[in-house]
Image (tube, rainbow, N blue to C red):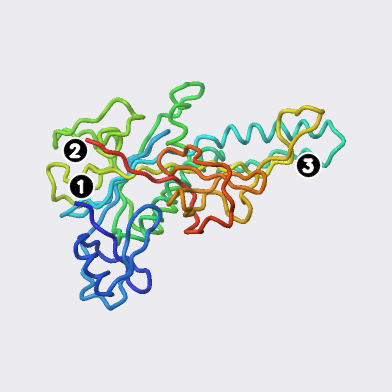
Amino acid sequence: MTFVPVVDKNQKPLMPTKPSRARRWIKEGKATPFWKRGVFCVRLNVEPSGEEKQEIAVGIDPGSKKEGFSIKSESHTFLNIQTDVPYWIKRSLKVRSMLRRDRRNRNCPNRKCRRNRKRKNFIPPSTKARWQWKLRVCNWLFKMYPITNFVVEDVRAIARRGYRYNYCFSHVQVGKNWFYSKLSELAPIEKKQGFETKQMRDVLDLKKSKNKLSNKFEAHCVDSWVLANSYTGGHTEVDNKQILFLKPLFFQRRRLHKINILKGGYKKRQGGTVSLGFKKGSLVSHQKYPLAYVGGNSNNCISLHSLDDGKLLSRWIKPQDCKFLTYNSWRFYNLKTN
């Protein structure tokens, strides 16, 4: 059963409730429904009858391309999430550096070359963006559920110079201490090693898929569920395998020129995060498309994209025909999983 997150008048998270009770509260005017980045929630308009809270843990299974999150108490599994990590940072920085060097050889405004400013504890931007993404998801969950603990699979790699083994683990190894320091400001952290996760999974007779890019529960959420269950207990088998999928949106930042020269020997301007008054990624409602997010713009029209797969719905939508719903920076969708 899917439970509905509940917050009070001050946006303080309370224990989730059953959908039937949430519907009754809304019908009686005791609560107001709202959506928070793809999750249906209710806000109480009256004082709660009680504020007793159970221990709720979030299990986190980090990965280099996909990750799993599970929110669980002793009695129920409230939510399973599988996310894609931002993979385009390194490529964007490489293109930016190439364009900057190219501008220095032309008679146009450019930033002068300066010395390397890398500090001792410097974290590469591509790696830091991945850990910042995990922190964003945890902050989002912390605003909906009264979380008491985070259980993270602590990935470790032996530091050996020149070994490709280190390179494969760099995305999930480097920068984790920064993540732990930020995450500990929300709730206490409990770390588990990879072999401990496997032992707990074997005790419960749970299998993990070898296909790490799969959308099945056994790909990543099985480990995040086991980690959360190790703290809360209460289950010997998975009670909820429904998954909410999250994927961060890629926004083309403002760029002075396109890379390729167009016909006539000029370069077209490109990029930006605003499309004719709408911030890119914002959720809007249109007469033909009840729920979509905003993409680029051209010829005084904006483009709308599907939340399910990100495909282009239409590029000839007039801004005045759209109703703004909320700002958004990731896609969320559900798939039927076994």
In the image, what residue type sits under mark 1? Asn
List the single residue furthest toward the bottom: 47
- Residue plotted at (30% across, 48% down): 151
Q: Circle 3 sits in a helix, a strand or a loop, which is it?
A: loop
Which residue is label 1 attached to? Answer: 229
Q: Circle 1 sits in a helix, a strand or a loop, which is it?
A: helix
Query: Considering only order in the chain, which callout, 2 or 3, is on the residue closer to the N terminus?
Result: 3
- Residue plotted at (48% across, 53% down): 286
Which residue is label 3 attached to? Answer: 111
Indicate whether 328 appears above or below 169.
Answer: below
Q: Are marks 2 and 1 in contact (CB under 8 Å)?
A: yes
Query: Considering only order in the chain, which callout, 1 or 2, is on the residue closer to the N terminus?
Result: 2
From the viewer's side, name the closer residue of 329 and 219: 329
Mark 1 neighbour density, 10 Å: few (under 14) some (14–19) many (20 or more): many
- Between the C-alphas of marks 3 and 1, the distance is 52 Å
Image location of residue 259, percent across then percent down = 71, 31
In the image, what residue type sits under mark 2? Met
Between tags 2 and 1, which lies in front? 1
- Between the C-alphas of marks 3 and 2, the distance is 54 Å
Quadrant position of residue 75? bottom left
Q: Are marks 3 and 2 in contact (CB under 8 Å)?
A: no
Quadrant position of residue 99? top right
Query: Considering only order in the chain, which callout, 1 or 3, is on the residue closer to the N terminus?
Result: 3
Which residue is label 2 attached to? Answer: 200
